Image (cartoon, rainbow, N blue to C red):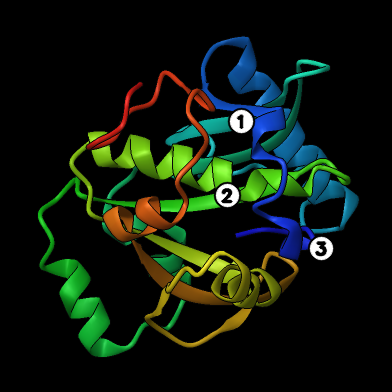
Amino acid sequence: MDINRGSHHVKRDTAAYRFMLAEGELRTSAITLHRQRYMEVGFMPPDFQDPYEKGSRYFVARHEATQRTVGVCRLVLQELWTLPTYHHFELFEHERRGLEQLKPGTSAELGALTKVPGHWGVTAGLMATALAHAATLGMSQVLCCSDQRLFHSVRAHLGLSPRVIGRERLFYGSIKIPCVLNISETLEQLALPPGAQEGVSAPGRAA
């Protein structure tokens, strides 16, 4: 889910950033940043065709002082069986059955979480903004395949409790852990300062 290191700083300085759904030119800049960072660390070759790009909504962190896009994540909004975690990982049978019993259109995948080095404070805001958007679509949980370091970091430093749903494996350049996040619980733990989000709402929050 995240290619960056130093993620123990994830909840620092969120007031220095604005978090929002990326549309138009902002969406293009989000995709560019995602590709750039993944290519820099060797996770994505220059000619790679991302099969999830078209079916995703992107979210960005904008640095208030420079108005620069410094972080990105996305929600992959496709059928369950096509989502990266469901499609590419060996899930525990009871977890797979549980996912398959969900109402169609209520599952998404949180991924492509990355940021410009030096802006470690944006992870919590990006996740909260994407999950708030998922909540407005009637979703209660999201799948993700999290880098091992990020998985342990968000548990230790953000107090999150992603539920492991399958066996870890090498995927996009690092060992990933397939897991699920409960949206309402995670949003409570990732509360942002007033005014940090633009154009995104969730139950109990102003847009």
Numbered mark located on residue 60 in the image: 1
126 above or below 64? below
Q: Foreground residue, 58 or 202? A: 202
Residue 130 is situated, as x and y percent measured from the top left of the image, at 44, 40
Circle 2 residues within 10 Å: few <14, some 14–19, many ≥20:
many
2 above or below 38? below
Name which residue lies at 25% across and 88% down: 93
105 above or below 42? above
**Mark before the other along the chain sequence, 1 or 3:** 3
Name which residue lies at 71% across and 49% down: 12
Instruction: Look at the image and tell me in which quarter the C terminus lies.
Output: top left
Which one is in front in this view, the residue at disc 1 or the one at disc 2?
2
137 above or below 174? above
Residue 195 is situated, as x and y percent measured from the top left of the image, at 50, 23
Under mark 3, the amino acid is Gly
Q: Secondary structure at mark 3?
A: loop
Q: Secondary structure at mark 1?
A: strand
Compared across the picture, whether 88 is left or right of 5 comes to left
Q: Is residue 111 visible in this depiction of the protein?
A: yes
Compared across the picture, whether 20 is left or right of 204 comes to right
For the residues bearing labels 3 and 2, Cβ distance under 8 angstroms: no
Q: Foreground residue, 56 or 199? A: 199
Q: Is residue 51 visible in this depiction of the protein?
A: no
Numbered mark located on residue 6 in the image: 3
Residue 148 is situated, as x and y percent measured from the top left of the image, at 65, 77
Q: Which residue is mark 2?
A: 124
